[in-house]
Image (cartoon, helix red, strand yellow):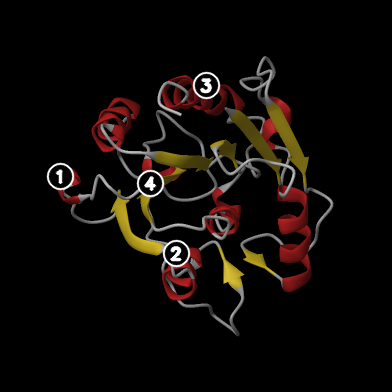
Amino acid sequence: MQTTIIKMTDAYEHQSFYNSNENLSIIDCRDLEGTRCYLDDYAKEQLLERMEAASLNGIHFIDSGNYHYLSLLWLMQIKTPFNLILFDHHPDDQPPSFGQITSCGGWVLEAKETLGNLMNVYTFGVGEMPDINTIDKDIPLYISIDKDVLSEDYAITDWDQGDMTIDEMIDLLKDIAKDRQIIGVDICGDSGEYAENGACVNNQINQTLFDFLSSFL
């Protein structure tokens, strides 16, 4: 199983959870402009090109929630029908403020409108929780986690946060993953703005999620 770290900010410079991983791909994109919250066409081409070195199947840490649209770029690689499991304090399904630009707040809507293999999106952390029993066990899953769904006791992010605990998240993930195929997982919600101050708690929660998710990928 491959672990991918995509550096969009300095968030991971202050963390160590990934250093001992032997099958690690680090993609440093801090040099790219046109990426914060909104993704311009040139930066999208550059990101897709750089991501070719990493495997879709694995755990991807994709920096701050300002770059959650990176999930869309992973989903674009899936060539068979799949369902998206989203943990997020925000639905990320807002239409763009201008043009058709990809954004961290609208990538889910863009995925629904443009990806023919995406069957359903199940969002945990916004409104009423989906019934896990209704998720088709015959369709593979891609899981995207924004740590802003967690309370500030468990993560320091660049966005307002929910009140989920890490134990609640892991219990839900256990039920979701049971008897279902997982294509890959990505995790955002680190802090570029408070990278050093949030490093301790974010490093710990990233390690916890990595250890747990590794058990079924």
Is the N terminus in the top left, top right, bottom left or bottom right quadrant?
top right
Q: Is residue 200 left or right of residue 142?
A: right
Relative image position of residue 48 (x, y in whole percent): 71, 57
Local packing at callout 4 (Cα closer than 10 Å; few below 14, some 14-19, many 20+) is many
Q: Image height check: is 97 above or below 61?
A: below
How far is mark 3 from mark 4, CA to CA? 22 Å
Relative image position of residue 187 (x, y in whole percent): 51, 40
How far is mark 1 from mark 2, CA to CA? 22 Å
Q: Image height check: is 84 above or below 6?
A: below
User: Sequence-wise, which precedes: disc 2 or disc 3?
Assistant: 2
User: Sequence-wise, which precedes: disc 3 or disc 4?
Assistant: 4
Q: Which mark is residue 207?
A: 3
**Residue for point 57% across, 22% down:** 200
Q: Which residue is mark 4?
A: 141
Q: Which mark is residue 108?
A: 2
Q: Is residue 69 left or right of residue 24?
A: left
Q: Which three-letter amino acid code belongs to the residue tagged 1?
A: Asn
Residue 199 seen from this side: yes
Q: Which residue is mark 1?
A: 133
Q: Image height check: is 98 above or below 124?
A: below
Observer-side mark, 3 or 4, equals 4
User: Sequence-wise, which precedes: disc 4 or disc 1?
Assistant: 1
Local packing at callout 2 (Cα closer than 10 Å; few below 14, some 14-19, many 20+) is many
User: Sequence-wise, which precedes: disc 1 or disc 3?
Assistant: 1
Residue sitting farthest toward the right: 31
Q: Which three-letter amino acid code belongs to the residue tagged 2?
A: Val
Mark 2–mark 4 contact, CB under 8 Å?
Answer: no
Local packing at callout 1 (Cα closer than 10 Å; few below 14, some 14-19, many 20+) is few
